[in-house]
Image (cartoon, helix red, strand yellow):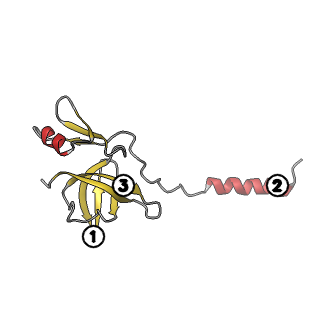
């Protein structure tokens, strides 16, 4: 037979677990596959030239581009730069990242530019990405 205090302790633990708050959503993970970019008709050739030296694929129909690797660092995030107050944000198909670091300046790629970005998730600042490499894919439309 178990002591009463042990039975009571088990009951308290079960009640605490049952009423626990759900965990906060996890930080967006690294993409499992390279991000894609929808291309306008005839845009594939100019983007391939701009991405010379990087591992790039274009769909047979010329409508989609993937960047598989940039400088041996793997696939970048691809998105559009947006302004959020004083901060610049990379809006991708999967997440929004506040951009940090010396490359996160409007004079390099301002709002409306489509870019690829290689960076580090900042563990102390949820949703922030410190840019190590950035490339402009297209100007604002």
The one nearer the camera, 123 or 126, is 123
How far apart marks 2 and 3 lie (CA) works out to 50 Å
What x and y, as percent, mark residue 93?
Answer: 30, 47
Residue 85 is tagged as 1
**Disc on the earlier residue, 1 or 3:** 1
The one nearer the camera, 55 or 36, is 55
The residue that appears at 34% across and 64% down in the rendered structure is 100
Considering only vertical position in the picture, is 13 above or below 33? below
What x and y, as percent, mark residue 76?
Answer: 32, 47
The residue that appears at 36% across and 43% down in the rendered structure is 74
What x and y, as percent, mark residue 84?
Answer: 28, 66
Task: Classify mark 3: helix, strand or loop.
Answer: strand
Residue behind mark 3: 119
How far apart marks 1 and 2 lie (CA) works out to 54 Å
Mark 1 or mark 3, whichever is nearer to me: 3
Residue behind mark 2: 6
């Amino acid at each position: 037979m178990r002591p009463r205090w042990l039975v009571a302790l088990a009951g308290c633990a079960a009640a605490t677990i049952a009423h626990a708050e759900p965990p906060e959503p996890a930080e967006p993970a690294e993409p499992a596959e390279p991000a894609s970019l929808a291309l306008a008709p005839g845009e594939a050739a100019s983007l391939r030239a701009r991405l010379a030296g990087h591992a790039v694929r274009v769909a047979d129909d010329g409508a989609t581009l993937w960047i598989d690797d940039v400088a041996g660092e793997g696939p970048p995030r691809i998105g559009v730069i947006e302004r959020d107050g004083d901060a610049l944000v990379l809006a991708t198909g999967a997440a929004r990242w506040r951009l940090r670091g010396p490359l996160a300046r409007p004079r390099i790629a301002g709002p409306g530019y489509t870019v690829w970005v290689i960076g580090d998730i900042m563990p102390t600042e949820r949703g922030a990405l410190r840019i190590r490499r950035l490339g402009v894919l297209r100007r604002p439309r």
